[in-house]
């Protein structure tokens, strides 16, 4: 028999992940509107070199973990972010992020942009809606020995 607490903890974890996913989506949309979102591995690397202190969150997004070149880029970005105290979040759901950020009112620079594997939220002075909730989720995940917090976005 499975203990009753087991089901309760799974429900809490699922709810926590869903809530963090919604918060992340709102955060990215808000950051995009405030021109505080850098999208793309190359663009993100340039920003990290030029001004790492402006970055408050690094989102690494994948749908398929079999791309070796992408994993090498992620490893280097993760190391840099860790060295600079930047919160990192690995997200499963690149297609969801593409639809979200290319939606109505999206930045014209993103319309043809194909690389949504790395995103940086910048400018800690800006009013980033839901940043604290995403940061709390990441801290709680690290306390549970998850070095790089992970989140699966729900398709809608």
Image (cartoon, rainbow, N blue to C red):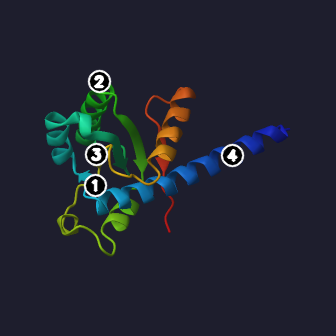
Near mark 1 (Cα within 10 A), the count class, few <14, some 14-19 or many ≥20, is many
Residue in view at x 33 percent, y 75 percent: 104
Considering every residue shown, the one lying at the far top of the view is 83
The image position of residue 119, as x and y in percent, is 29, 49
Whichever of callouts 2 and 1 sits on the residue coming sooner in the sequence is 2
Whichever of callouts 4 and 2 sits on the residue coming sooner in the sequence is 4
Q: Measure how far apart labels 1 and 3 are at the Cα level.
A: 20 Å
The image position of residue 81, as x and y in percent, is 30, 31
Near mark 2 (Cα within 10 A), the count class, few <14, some 14-19 or many ≥20, is few
SS class of the residue under badge 4? helix
Left or right relative to 30: residue 2: right
Q: Which residue is mark 1?
A: 116
The image position of residue 83, as x and y in percent, is 29, 24
Q: Measure how far apart labels 2 and 1 are at the Cα level.
A: 23 Å
SS class of the residue under badge 1? loop
SS class of the residue under badge 2? helix
Q: Which residue is mark 4?
A: 12
Q: Which residue is mark 3?
A: 123
Q: Is residue 94 visible?
A: no
Q: Which residue is mark 2?
A: 83
Front residue of 52 and 19: 52
Quadrant for residue 46, please give it. top left
Point out the image quarter for the N terminus.
top right
Q: Measure how far apart labels 2 and 3 are at the Cα level.
A: 19 Å
């Amino acid at each position: 028999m499975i203990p009753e607490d087991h089901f309760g903890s799974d429900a809490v974890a699922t709810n926590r992940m869903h809530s963090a996913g919604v918060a992340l989506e709102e955060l990215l949309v808000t950051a995009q509107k405030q021109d505080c979102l850098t999208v793309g591995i190359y663009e993100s690397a340039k920003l990290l070199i030029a001004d790492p202190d402006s970055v408050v969150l690094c989102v690494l997004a994948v749908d398929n973990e079999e791309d070796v070149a992408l994993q090498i880029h992620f490893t280097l970005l993760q190391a840099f972010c860790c060295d600079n105290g930047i919160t990192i979040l690995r997200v499963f759901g690149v297609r969801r992020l593409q639809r979200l950020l290319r939606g109505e009112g999206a930045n014209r620079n993103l319309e043809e942009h194909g690389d949504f594997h790395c995103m940086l939220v910048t400018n800690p002075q800006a009013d980033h809606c839901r940043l604290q909730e995403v940061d709390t989720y990441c801290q709680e995940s690290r306390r549970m020995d998850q070095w790089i917090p992970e989140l699966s976005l729900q398709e809608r």
